Image (cartoon, grey):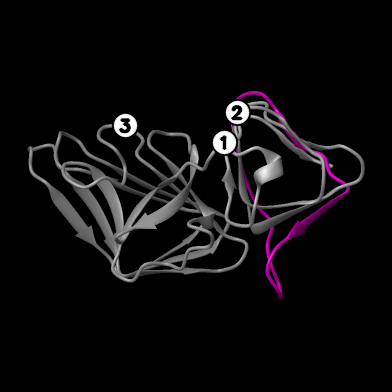
Amino acid sequence: DIALSGGRLDLIGRSNGTSGTETLGVLHSVAGENQINVQRAGSNATVLAFSSLDRTAGSTLEFTNDTGGGTLGSTGSNPRVTFTSSPTLERTILPYAVYGDGTTPTAFAGITSGRLTAVTGTDTAQGSWGASTIAANTADQTMSANRTVGALNLGSGIDVLQSGSRTLTIDTGGILSTGATASTISVSTLNVGGTGDRELITHVYGGVLTIT
């Protein structure tokens, strides 16, 4: 097993032209932001294989392929992270985990056939948001009524605003904000869906995210 508390784990592929797999036990995400970077040295597969994932509330995970060689999570001659026992998804994503095919995350992480993959979301207008929508809008959204959305993937400078007094419920609690230009979420009430103790999980890269 391996436990990370604000740590980083790198797996660099073999430079001799052969594929390689590093097999570990449970990945424990204990505290803080934890980074997992898997990259190939040549043009062959590099695989980091875990048995399962155990996460403590409050911790986050960032999965990257720093060199950008191949496509993180794809089959064949590509770098990837796998789980024998896949972690449970919420609305197709792991709201506490993000994916970057390069050094900067651009999507929420999901699982496809045991492989960690990207869930980029859809450019769905706020009037059509629902609890299963992973919204990745290309323009600002002004809420005309109370809305529920699965998660928000805010690109550079994309804002979520309100007309009147509105409540925004993020079903999974996941917010990803990327790009050099600041983004704003400005609503009267911001809720997290589900029951019991739930987390609002923000991942901010490159700029500033303001929630008011």
Mark 3, mark 1: which one is toward the viewer?
1
The C terminus, quarter of image: top right
- Given contact means CB atoms under 8 Å apart, are the residues at marks 2 and 1 in contact? yes
Q: Left or right: where does residue 99 sit relative to residue 76?
A: right
Q: Nearer the viewer, residue 159 or 100?
A: 159
Residue at the (34%, 39%) spot, across then down? 65
Residue 83 image point, x, y percent? 31, 64
State the residue lying farthest toward the bottom.
196
Residue at the (70%, 33%) spot, across then down? 208
Q: Secondary structure at mark 2?
A: loop
C-alpha gap between disc 3 and disc 1:
28 Å
For label 1, the residue is 123
Name the kind of residue labelled 1 in the image.
Asp
Q: Left or right: where does residue 36 sit relative to residue 188?
A: left
The tag earlier along the polypeptide, 3 or 1, is 3
Label annotation for residue 67 = 3
Name the kind of residue labelled 3 in the image.
Thr
The tag earlier along the polypeptide, 2 or 1, is 1
The N terminus, quarter of image: bottom left
- Given contact means CB atoms under 8 Å apart, are the residues at marks 3 and 1 in contact? no
C-alpha gap between disc 2 and disc 3:
27 Å
User: In the figure, 36 relative to 1: above or below?
Assistant: above
C-alpha gap between disc 2 and disc 1:
6 Å
Mark 2, mark 3: which one is toward the viewer?
2
Neighbor class of circle 3 (other Cα within 10 Å; few <14, some 14-19, many 20+) is some
Magenta region, residue range: 175-204
- Given contact means CB atoms under 8 Å apart, are the residues at marks 2 and 3 in contact? no
Name the kind of residue labelled 2 in the image.
Thr
User: In the figure, 27 relative to 64: above or below?
Assistant: below
Q: Secondary structure at mark 3?
A: loop
For label 2, the residue is 138
